[in-house]
Amino acid sequence: MAYVRRDVGTLTGAEKRRFVNALLEVKRRGEYDAFVRTHIEFFSPDGEDGLRVAHMAPSFLPWHRRFLLDLERALRRVDSTVTVPYWDWTRERTTTSVPWTADLLGGNGRRSDHQVMTGPFAHREGNWTIKVGVTDEVFLTRDFGNPRHPIDLPTKGELEQALKDPAYDVAPWDSTVTRGFRNKLEGWGSGRGSASWRNHNRVHRWVGGAMLGGASVNDPVFWLHHAFVDLQWERWQRRHRGARYLPATPPGPGDEQHERIVARHQKLPPWDETPDELEDVGRIYRYA
């Protein structure tokens, strides 16, 4: 029977504690840091040579869906009642609303060094030392809204701009495309400032601190954010019945994306699954 992922704002106090305790146990076992290493390994921009699967590519959505499932399975090995909740950043938009409460993820970082000082993932609690990252900091950091260069969370209208596009993705299948649901949701734009970060990307920029770059998994909000992104893929599928992951077939020799992106029936490293197999996971979980 499929389990349910719920809006983080609807969780009871007991459900929040179970989720937090499961995350802390996965961290204690050393499993969590493996997720950070995996995301860093596959955080490849489209300006580099070689295969891209996690970002700036059509497989952004199925790759993160599979990644999220791996974390969720690790949590459920600790506590079978736990699922990953989602954070609706079009609705919970303040710096003190869920999930930024002391009984869940804690709040913003302090002004001096952006270190998170509240909640169960604060370094001073002794349970969340950053061991794998792109900086030398051992504590979790956040910088809500990036006050030096202010940025807002995406709005419902901005999310709707992605959801209404009937094409999953379009050539050249990278960060430069201006049509297609995938990049409108992933959020690589042109221009400067807020205009260059949309939807998924802008949320990472708004949280700031550890959520910037390949080691963003170090902030547990990564999972709540990506659960909401995953929900948008499901909503897009329901709206555009019959629309499928693209490209259906690999770009051929001579195409600049030849052997650089994953087509519908090709395997998604580091797993033995294809985007086609991950388009429908209703047998595993559903969203409330």
Image (tube, rainbow, N blue to C red):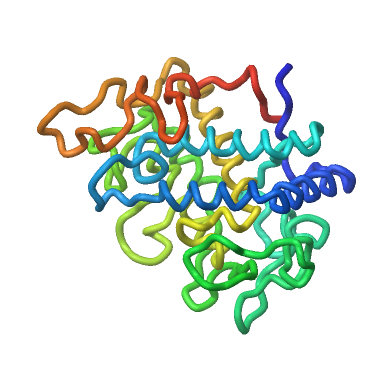
Is 224 situated left or right of 188 in this image?
A: right
Q: Which residue is found at the position 36% from the left and 28% from the top?
A: 167
Q: Residue furthest front?
A: 29
Q: Which residue is found at the position 32% from the left and 51% from the top?
A: 45
Nearer to us in this view, 272 or 200: 272
Nearer to us in this view, 186 or 55: 55
| Whole-percent x, y for residue 89 in the image | 62, 50
Q: Residue furthest right?
A: 14
| Whole-percent x, y for residue 245 in the image | 39, 25
Q: Quadrant of the C terminus?
A: top right
Q: Residue furthest left?
A: 254
Q: Which residue is found at the position 74% from the left and 34% from the top?
A: 76
Q: Quadrant of the N terminus?
A: top right
Nearer to us in this view, 182 or 191: 182
Q: Is residue 133 above or below residue 253?
A: below
Count of all numbered marks drawn on residues in the image? 0
| Whole-percent x, y for residue 119 in the image | 78, 64
Q: Which residue is found at the position 73% from the left and 53% from the top?
A: 28
Is 14 situated left or right of 29 in this image?
A: right
Nearer to us in this view, 195 or 4: 4
Is 10 situated left or right of 164 in this image?
A: right
